[in-house]
Amino acid sequence: QVQLVQSGAEVKKPGASVKVSCKASGYTFTSYDINWVRQATGQGLEWMGWMNPNSGNTGYAQKFQGRVTMTRNTSISTAYMELSSLRSEDTAVYYCARATFNWFDPWGQGTLVTVSS
Amino acid sequence: DIQMTQSPSSLSASVGDRVTITCQASQDISNYLNWYQQKPGKAPKLLIYDASNLETGVPSRFSGSGSGTDFTFTISSLQPEDIATYYCQQYDNLSYTFGQGTKLEIK
């Protein structure tokens, strides 16, 4: 079945970077965009950006431009999201999701990133 | 960027009730509007895509309608397992936005 499996929880200090992975299985990895969405505790969903695994092309939400980088390794069907210059407000669960046309399905299980000194 | 206004932010209803959530876009998005259900500690789950299409395996008590700027999500007969937070999501010009969410509780 189509599945996205993300890397485990991370604890980072302010100013550091974090890189979250998202391994795809059950479909052709290069045929669908991967999007990243985050959710702070008790808050709503916030879209961060997309990546085309075939071309490597990316598009980022304005809020994250300059701080986020989305990449992939097609040989292992894995997408990555790296967020730099972390601050406490970046503490959240980060999700990857496959985009089919304009909707997201399925989603990864989520990765908790905690930013704390 | 397109803004999505979702209402209400919370809703309390009884089992068997008809429940309606609305989402308004700040500009015309055609039918590029999707609805998700999120239960505590879980990833969101797609329920409705392109405003009115029911995702495979989703119970028929869920439905969606609308186009342009105004959209509606309906649960025809609320069940205990429907307790969750619901989000709308729009797509426009390679950018996506979610509504603020509606937390649904049982009365």
Image (spheres, coloured by chain):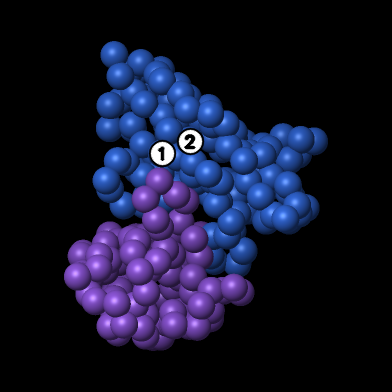
- The chain that hosts pointer 2 is A
The tag on residue A111 is 2
Judge by depth and name the residue closer to the eye, A7 or B23: A7
**Label 2 near label 1: C-beta < 8 Å?**
yes
Q: Colour of chain A?
A: blue
Where in the figure is residue B82, as x and y percent of width and height?
A: 38, 68
Position of the N terminus of chain B by quadrant = bottom left
Instruction: Give the quadrant of residue A83.
Output: top left
Judge by depth and name the residue closer to the eye, B8 or A34: B8
The tag on residue A93 is 1
Judge by depth and name the residue closer to the eye, B107 or A10: B107
Sort mark 1 into few (<14), some (14-19) or many (20+) by Cα contacts within 10 Å: many
Q: Is residue A83 above or below residue A46?
A: above
- Which residue lies at the image location 46% right of the left edge and 56% below the top edge? B44
- The chain that hosts pointer 1 is A
Measured Cα–Cα span from mark 1 to mark 2? 5 Å
Where in the figure is residue B27, as x and y percent of width and height?
A: 33, 74
Q: Is residue B32 in sight in this rendering? A: no
Q: Is residue A104 in sight in this rendering? A: yes
Residue type at tag 2: Thr
Q: Secondary structure at mark 1?
A: strand
Q: Is residue A82 above or below residue B64?
A: above
The tag on residue A60 is none
Where in the figure is residue B84, as x and y percent of width and height?
A: 35, 61
- Which residue lies at the image location 54% right of the left edge and 60% below the top edge? A104
Q: Is residue A114 above or below residue B76?
A: above
Where in the figure is residue B51, as x and y percent of width and height?
A: 46, 79
- Which residue lies at the image location 73% right of the left edge and 47% below the top edge? A25
Relative placement, left or right, of A8 versus B22 is right
Note the chain letter of the purple one: B
Tell me which label, 1 or 2, sits earlier in the chain. 1
Position of the C terminus of chain B by quadrant = bottom left
